[in-house]
Amino acid sequence: MSLTRSIVSLPLLWLCVTAIPAGPGYWPNGTRSEIVGGDFSAEAYGLIDNYDGTNWLNMFDVQAIADPTHGFVEYVNAQQAQQLGLLRTQGSQVYMGVDTTSTLNPNGPGRKSVRIQSKRAYNQALVIADFAHVPGSNCGSWPAFWMVGPNWPNQGEIDIYEGVHLNTYNQATLHSSSGCVPSVGPGGETGRRVANADCGAGGGFDGCGVMSNSPTSYGTAFNANGGGVYATLWTNSGIKVWYFASNAVPANIRNGSPDPNSWGTPTANFGPGCNYGARFRDMNIVFDITFCGDWAGGVWGQTSCAQVNPSCNAYVASQPQSFADSYWLINSVKVYSV
């Protein structure tokens, strides 16, 4: 049994008062992504892209970069990731994980992991991610599935799935330039507002978040519940995020004809009070798993994890077996026009 499983989790909801960004993104040597979307003559909810095991390695860039969030992590390149078994396809599914065997120097480069960014960028879209497995709720871990534009925070960041340590409640967060102050949109939301009213608070660093009310929306509990779907509707009038457990995914998502109007109240409903067309633009899809760093490391001392080791980096360095379930197993990510 890993030490993670022997730790008694303290309530973690209050640790998320500041919604640390997962970003910014990375565009080497001034390169730009192909931009898709924003074409309002397109068929509503027509499929633009379907990312899965048949095309994943061609549709994403693997980014061997220094972690912008200062984590205890070594992001490896595509060749290393595949050689180490950290990135692979399994039929139509995609596996992305971390090194689970190496005992490390806590003052060294960190635990090997994978960070990817889509080659394409989008302007307004319906993004539906179907997960068989997400990184487990482990001390030191900080996984995220998010979207980000260049020139951060001026072109925005949408953190769709994110959390730290032993949490089981997902947090959806917007980061932007100052002056984006979204109220709850029409129809309401089931989640709880956390952090700041202004998504540009702290120069965009703090963000504005909504904590899910579902105890199976993140990490180990999400996996134990059979996985599920995250759907994000991004339009000029607002940004909504839904979570569906695998046994409650709407039929119109499963059959490829999504209809957000039939899905009920979203977890997060960022509505009036923000110019979404101006503040969220040209956004790429990003997946990563980092450790410690700005958020997970910043709140380490406030969790029961610190009872095992006072240092987040030292814990992650010495406990490779604790991260056996720190991996994504993705059925698909589908992007639809809006």
Image: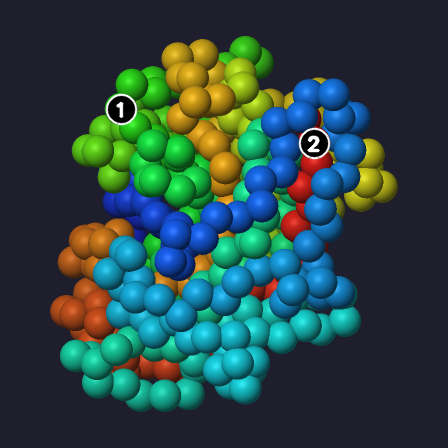
Whether 197 is drawn above or below 37: the answer is above
**Kind of residue at badge 1:** Ser
Numbered circle sitting on residue 313: none
Residue 277 in picture, x, y percent from top left: 48, 22
Q: Earlier in the sequence, mark 1 or mark 2?
A: 1
Whether 181 is drawn above or below 229: the answer is above
Instruction: Name the quarter where the N terminus is drawn.
Output: bottom left
Q: Quadrant of residue 150?
A: top left
Would you name the residue on which mark 2 appears? 337
How far apart marks 1 and 2 lie (CA) works out to 28 Å
- Residue at 65 percent across and 64 percent down: it is 58
Left or right: 173 in relation to 52: left
**Kind of residue at badge 2:** Ser
Instruction: Name the quarter where the C terminus is drawn.
Output: top right
Which of the pair 145/193 is nearer the observer?
A: 145
Res. 252 in view: no
- Residue at 39 percent across and 13 percent down: it is 273
Residue 240 in picture, x, y percent from top left: 54, 27
- Badge 1 local density, few (<14 within 10 Å), some, or many (20+)? some
Q: Quadrant of residue 99?
A: bottom left
Residue 67 in picture, x, y percent from top left: 31, 62
Would you name the residue on which mark 1 appears? 178
Residue 87 in picture, x, y percent from top left: 57, 74
